[in-house]
Amino acid sequence: MPLRVELKPFERIVIGETVLINSGSRTSFLVDGEAPILREKDTVTAETANTPVKRLYFCVQMMYLKNDVSRYRTSYLGFIKDLREALPGSREQIDAANAHVSSGALYKALKEIRKLMKLQEERLAA
């Protein structure tokens, strides 16, 4: 089933290893296929991966977008260890994200990790 994507003016979307940038007006299109897709707002760059949870997110994001889990596996395991130490009270969410990665459901893992990023931001703001 195709995915309908609506983009605001100048919004970006990553499809696989390609970045699409919308023009100056709102647009929508359908994506039919199995390519990994992330909106720009849901991406983390190497420069912004400055916390344990963001480093883990960036690693899983690369696994997802490049469709290459084995290439990032060693880094991933280190980031999981670091995150467990940094957020010991979040074991359940970390384990859920890890289970998704282990089963190959990388987009679901990214969603779980985004929850952890929000939790970490709330803790830092308090």
Image: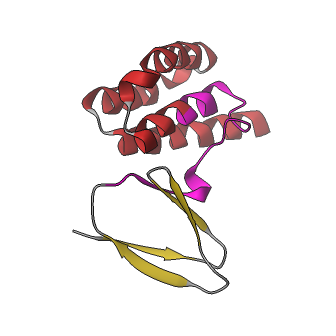
Quarter-of-image position of residue 33? bottom left
- Against 39, residue 27 (above or below) is below
The colour scheme of the drawn protein is secondary structure
Which residue is most to the right?
Answer: 125
Residue at 46%, 24% in the rendered image? 72
Quarter-of-image position of residue 101? top left
| Residue 35 position in % (x across, y down) | 35, 54
Quarter-of-image position of residue 4? bottom left
Which residue is most to the front?
Answer: 18
- Against 79, residue 36 (above or below) is below
The answer, for residue 75, to whether it is visible in the render is: yes
Quarter of the image for the N terminus: give it: bottom left
In magenta, the rendered stretch is 35-58
- Against 115, residue 27 (above or below) is below
Which residue is most to the left?
Answer: 1
Residue at 54%, 35% in the rendered image? 57
| Residue 34 position in % (x across, y down) | 28, 55
- Would you say residue 71 sits in the magenta stretch? no
Q: How many labels does the image show?
A: 0
Residue at 63%, 24% in the rendered image? 52
- Against 103, residue 12 (above or below) is below
Q: Report the side of 6 relative to 100 (left or right).
A: right
| Residue 92 position in % (x across, y down) | 41, 26
- Would you say residue 47 sits in the magenta stretch? yes
Quarter of the image for the C terminus: give it: top right
| Residue 111 position in % (x across, y down) | 45, 45
The answer, for residue 95, to whether it is visible in the render is: no
Residue at 43%, 23% in the rendered image? 71
